[in-house]
Amino acid sequence: MVKVFVGGFPLDMEEMQLAMLFAPHGDISTLKIVRDKKTRICKGYAFIEMVDRAGAENAVEALDGTMFAGKTLTVNINEEPAVKPSIASSFNSYGRQPVYQKVQRLGTEVKKKRPRRVI
């Protein structure tokens, strides 16, 4: 799977239109148009996972810099950054997780947490 970034398309574009634009270049696994959480309005960019790298490269070559509905598309292969080892793993050399427990003062009761409201 190769993740492709697509930006600069019109805000009223739907998933099917974007899928039809990329389908001739390779098989699409997933397509996610990024939208505002509250208003659900498109932010103008999306991520597409393509099945193979050759299809993703074909899409980048064919669609990057092209005009679509009066806007210039930006299409790039999204390279995942290398995962850095965490500092906590170097302190925990024995492979055990540290044990934490809540400590209370002598003669006081532990406050019970209220359950979250389910909406």
Image (spheres, rainbow, N blue to C red):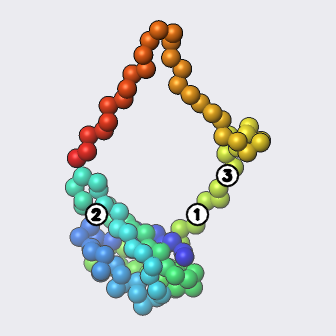
Percent x, y of residue 103: 54, 20
Identify the residue under disc 3.
84
- Identity of the residue furthest to the top in this view: 107
Q: Say which residue appears at 29% left-offset and 81% top-offset.
A: 17
Look at mark 1 in the image and give the residue it sits on: 80
Q: Quadrant of residue 22?
A: bottom left
Q: Position of residue 35 (x, y in %)?
A: 31, 61
| Residue 74 visible | no
**Residue 88, x across and y down, in percent:** 68, 40
Q: Are marks 1 and 2 in contact (CB under 8 Å)?
A: no
| Mark 3 or 2, nearer chain start | 2
Query: Residue 74's image quarter?
Result: bottom left
| Camera-side residue of 106 and 22 | 106
SS under mark 2: strand
- Compared with 59, 48 (above or below) is above
Classify 10 Å Cα crowding around label 1: few (below 14), some (14-19), many (20 and above): few
Residue 36 place in picture, x, y as percent = 29, 56
Asked whether the beta carbons under mark 3 and mark 2 sit within 8 Å of each other, the answer is: no
> In the rendered view, would you say 59 is above or below 100?
below
Which residue position is annotated with label 2? 42
The residues tagged by marks 3 and 2 sit, at their Cα atoms, a distance apart of 32 Å
- Mark 2 Cα within 10 Å, few/some/many (few <14, many 20+)? some
Q: Earlier in the sequence, mark 1 or mark 2?
A: 2
The residue drawn where x is 27% and y is 74% is 14
| Residue in the foreground of this view, choosing between 45 and 1 | 1
Quarter of the N terminus within the rendering: bottom right
Say what amino acid the circle numbered 1 marks. Answer: Glu
What secondary structure is found at the residue carrying circle 1? loop
Amino acid type at mark 3: Lys
